[in-house]
Image: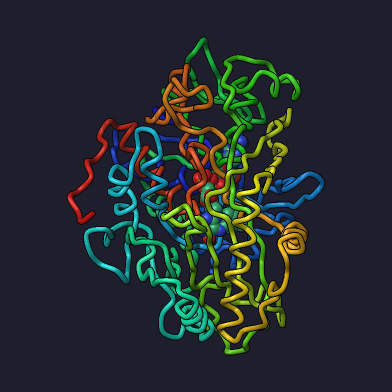
Amino acid sequence: MSWDVVVVGGGSAGCALAGRLTEDPRRRVLLLEAGTAVSDAAAFSPDVRDVASLAAADPDGPHTWDVGVELLPGKHTRVGRGRLLGGSSAVNGANHLRATRADLDAWPGWSYEATLPYYIRGERDLDVRGPLHGDRGPVPVVRPAGELRAPVTERFLAAAARVGVPAEPDKNGDQPPGAGLVPGNVRRGVRVNAAMAYVLPHLARENLAVRGDVTVARVLLVGDRAVGVECADGERIEAGEVVLAAGSVCTPQLLALSGVGPPDALHTAGLPVRHELRGVGRGYGDHPSVYLAFPDPGDGLHPEAPGAQAVVHLDAGDDPAGDLEILLFARPFAPDGPCHLMCALQAPESRGVMGFASGPGEPPRLEHRYLVSGHDRARMRQVVRRAGEMLAVGGLALDPTRGSDDRALDAWITAHLTTSAHLCSTAKLGPASDPDAVVDPELRVHGLRGLRVVDTSVLPTVPRRGPAATALMLGERAADLIAGTVAEAPAHPA
Ligand SMILES: Cc1cc2nc3c(=O)[nH]c(=O)nc-3n(C[C@H](O)[C@H](O)[C@H](O)COP(=O)(O)OP(=O)(O)OC[C@H]3O[C@@H](n4cnc5c(N)ncnc54)[C@H](O)[C@@H]3O)c2cc1C
């Protein structure tokens, strides 16, 4: 059987794309997911549904790819990325923050104005109304309020104001960076993942088929045209168009397994070279971060409340869009443990490189090369110091960084360094004149026909806010790109 479109990866972008594409009953779409595919939202396990739990992201758990990452030479960690229908949106923090205008305006051929209609179309914002917000989309968006807002959240926001951080009351409202509540894709304590929003309500559509437990091994190429995919068990599936939506780790790996990538890296992995594209898996970005712990004030937190409640975005000095983030986790990660401020660098200069695995279903090796630049190290010190100041001013703990000179603080940061798990740009979009671009602004792989990438791989840089909402926006907009009906931006206040 042949399909009009085969979407590889039922994650954030893949679900949004498949849901939107099949609104046209003439288009037949097959969505393939390597992990389990439930057919009913209630069938997701409690840790996947419960927004208060981060347990589903355990790299040893049943819902994840276990991705090894080298943060700095010799310093390793593991990231659990979603491997189930819903993808990483089913295991993540459910923080639903749009990229900033500065991020979007820097994407070749894209812009804030071009993406706004798709952020709006995807959401049903239950708190904020107005021309910048949607009220009919499939993704509910709420901010912690009433009994779901922790008392420590108020103290955090008050501390931010006392150290001079301006308020940013609507984090998705195109406002200057500041302090505000975290919008979340949540409804009554349930993490509303992309499958719940975009796919499961539409399983009755005759033109939509969803298959779980199918790992795609490579794209089938005839000459310069993609004609389908081959699965790990040898099954071949024909398609008019193949869309890779396997996420920023597995999509470049799939391109490599298909012979598409930088020749030296393909040779190293023992893979044939079918089509040279030097940007695959190279020059990617992610947010380096560290956690500052502080004693749980013991105010109590409603069991349905999200852990990440409020966030500060700051300009370190030369980035008015805000290149630093301080995110309050009001719920301890472990019983009787401390609460945390996550301090992150949102516009890092450091760029990573991927080493490909030679077999399907095996994750590649990731070298993030964090903090190689002095500018990145200086900004990390700054965000930790600002967070420490806020803790001290908020009476939450003594500033643990006070008195630390740069050298001592660098050592502390290196020892505590981790990643926000926001990997992007492993198959970035750009014009054909950019030798590092992998897809064009319509998300078609350069030099090949019938093959697109629609996931966070294509973002030219990691956005200054978490990429989850942007992954959904990509799926939304890609559906219109494929249909040839890209929406115009509505008039709205600048
Ligand atoms: C633990 C964690 C917490 C996070 N928290 C937040 C947050 O709170 N806010 C935020 O903004 N961002 C967050 N992020 C990042 C954000 O969730 C991701 O960037 C985003 O969801 C990625 O979307 P995607 O569509 O690119 O890929 P994914 O959602 O990861 O989807 C890729 C899908 O493809 C499937 N797949 C892969 N390979 C194959 C194959 N060969 N064959 C078939 N299927 C395949 C995968 O199983 C997966 O389902 C978090 C990420 C993690 C890992």
Name the residue rendered at 71%, 40% in the picture: 367
In the image, residue 373 sits, relative to residue 176, either above or below, namely above
Front-most of residues 117 and 283: 283
Image position, residue 289 (x, y; %) = 64, 58
In the image, residue 196 sits, relative to residue 328, either above or below, namely above
In the displayed structure image, the side of residue 122 where residue 382 appears, left or right: right
Name the residue rendered at 40%, 71% in the picture: 166
Image position, residue 377 (x, y; %) = 65, 53
Please identify the residue farthest to the left as the structure is shown. 491
Image position, residue 113 (x, y; %) = 28, 45
Residue 480 picture quarter:
top left
Residue 256 visible from this viewpoint: yes
Name the residue rendered at 34%, 31% in the picture: 482
Residue 44 picture quarter:
bottom right
Quadrant of the snapshot with the C terminus: bottom left
In the displayed structure image, the side of residue 83 where residue 2 appears, left or right: left
In the displayed structure image, the side of residue 485 where residue 42 appears, left or right: right
